[in-house]
Amino acid sequence: MHVKTYMEWAFLHFDPWSRAGRFHLAHRDQLTAGFLNICSIANKLDALLDVRRDRSVDVLCLAETWHDVGGVAFNRLQAANYQVVDRPRPRSAESADLSTNHGGVAVIAAPVVNCLI
């Protein structure tokens, strides 16, 4: 396994067969995972998908997604056959308004990755 960095991105490359049965890549023998503190996915989804395509990133790990349950960005990803696991920051009863929900994390697997979620 080795790590490459591009700007604020960190990419991990490793052999998927070293953890047999966990996932499978179509047409490749290497998995690339990227991590980004995205500070709101809502206005960056198209740029994020461009980077995923250009860098051949298979799994995106995102911090600070700033989303709520049922966010439009994640619905778009799921409609495009991405596998998404997300957890918005829980809101308290006092903050159940329309303000930005800071926090939140997500893991997004590209359609070429078959994994158990």
Image: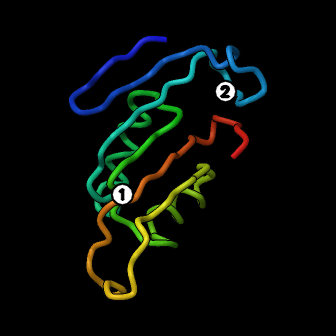
Instruction: Tell me the element at label 1.
Output: loop
Horizontal placement of 8 versus 83: left or right? Answer: left
Q: Residue at x 26, y 54 (%)?
A: 39
Above or below, 79 against 7 in this view is below
Above or below, 116 against 31 in this view is below
Q: Quadrant of residue 100?
A: bottom left
Mark 1 = which residue? 65
Q: Nearer the viewer, mark 1 or mark 2?
A: 1
Above or below, 96 against 59 in this view is below
Numbered mark located on residue 93 in the image:
none
Residue 59 is situated, as x and y percent measured from the top left of the image, at 52, 36
| Sequence order check, earlier mark of 1 and 2 | 2
Q: Residue at x 46, y 40 (%)?
A: 60
**Residue closest to the far left:** 7
Question: Label 2 neighbourhood size at 10 Å, few (<14), some (14-19), many (20+)?
Answer: some
The colour scheme used here is rainbow
Q: CA distance from mark 1 to mark 2?
A: 26 Å
- Amino acid type shown at disc 2: Leu
Residue 18 is situated, as x and y percent measured from the top left of the image, at 68, 14
Horizontal placement of 19 versus 109: left or right? Answer: right
Q: Residue at x 39, y 76 (%)?
A: 91
Residue 19 is situated, as x and y percent measured from the top left of the image, at 70, 20
**Residue closest to the far right:** 21
Numbered mark located on residue 25 in the image:
2
Residue 42 is situated, as x and y percent measured from the top left of the image, at 34, 63
Count of marks, rendered view: 2
Above or below, 52 against 10 in this view is below
Q: Residue at x 49, y 11 (%)?
A: 1
Q: Nearer the viewer, residue 89 or 8?
A: 89
User: Are dots 1 and 2 in contact, CB under 8 Å?
Assistant: no
- Amino acid type shown at disc 1: Thr
